[in-house]
Image (spheres, rainbow, N blue to C red):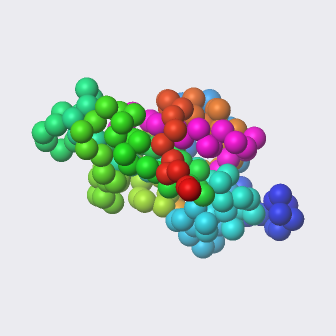
């Protein structure tokens, strides 16, 4: 049973790349699989029975003009971990990185960088190591949920452990509401 009292999906196998990452990190997490894809944070929260801000979105951006990202060329991918109820403030990400320009990556770059499709990108276990910015908002809960490599799978973890295994730096990059 989930926190909301609804029946939960049975434990499942994560994406093979993500399973390798879990093994390499020494993590043993319960992966849940849902019959219907949950590619959005709202769909995942509804399927799990948790609050929207307990979902961790793994979002890829491209940065140019920082020490890690030259101002010319293709730019450098950056992973931003954000709670499901919030939006990323691209200007805050740019300032945090000291970049001249930051934009959301397209689906092809997301798959090339992470090895996963949008809607199933986990916070770690990626094909390419990137800079990781974790918004402070994901620390508000004892347990958060993230994709396990597919739009059908998720896993729970405490946020501090998730950020540590992702190699993330805690920052404030959420859009501010008035």
Q: Position of residue 5 (x, y in %)?
A: 87, 65
Question: Does residue 9 belong to the magenta stretch?
Answer: no
In the rendered view, tell whether residue 57 sits above or below residue 160.
below
Q: Residue furthest front?
A: 178
Image point (41%, 58%), residue name: 117
Q: Nearer the viewer, residue 124 or 97?
A: 97
Q: Position of residue 143 (x, y in %)?
A: 73, 44
Image point (31%, 31%), residue name: 98
Left or right for 119, reference 145 = left
The span shown in magenta is: 128-145
Image quadrant in which the N terminus is located: bottom right
Left or right for 147, reference 128 = right
* Quarter assignment of residue 160: top right
Q: Residue furthest left?
A: 72
Image point (28%, 36%), residue name: 99
In the rendered view, tell whether residue 88 sits above or below residue 42.
above
Whether residue 29 is visible here, answered yes or no, is: no
In the rendered view, tell whether residue 141 sits above or below residue 84.
above
Image point (66%, 59%), residue name: 52
Q: Nearer the viewer, residue 76 or 119?
A: 76
Left or right for 90, reference 109 = right
Image quadrant in which the C terminus is located: bottom right
Whether residue 145 is visible here, answered yes or no, is: yes
Q: Position of residue 136 (x, y in %)?
A: 59, 38
């Amino acid at each position: 049973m989930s926190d909301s009292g609804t029946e939960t999906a049975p434990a499942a196998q994560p994406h093979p790349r993500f399973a390798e990452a879990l093994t390499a990190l020494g993590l043993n997490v319960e992966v849940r699989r849902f019959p219907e894809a949950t590619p959005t944070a709202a769909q995942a929260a509804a399927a799990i029975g948790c609050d929207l801000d307990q979902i961790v979105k793994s979002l890829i951006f491209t940065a140019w003009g920082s020490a890690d990202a030259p101002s010319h060329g293709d730019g450098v991918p950056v992973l931003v971990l954000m709670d499901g109820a919030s939006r990323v403030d691209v200007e805050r990400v740019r300032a945090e990185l000291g970049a001249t320009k930051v934009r959301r990556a397209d689906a092809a770059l997301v798959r090339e960088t992470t090895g996963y499709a949008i809607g199933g990108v986990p916070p770690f276990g990626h094909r390419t190591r990137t800079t990781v910015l974790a918004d402070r908002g994901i620390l508000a809960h004892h347990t958060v949920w993230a994709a396990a490599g597919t739009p059908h799978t998720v896993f729970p973890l405490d946020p501090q452990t998730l950020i540590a295994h992702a190699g993330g730096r805690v920052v404030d990059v959420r859009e501010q509401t008035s």
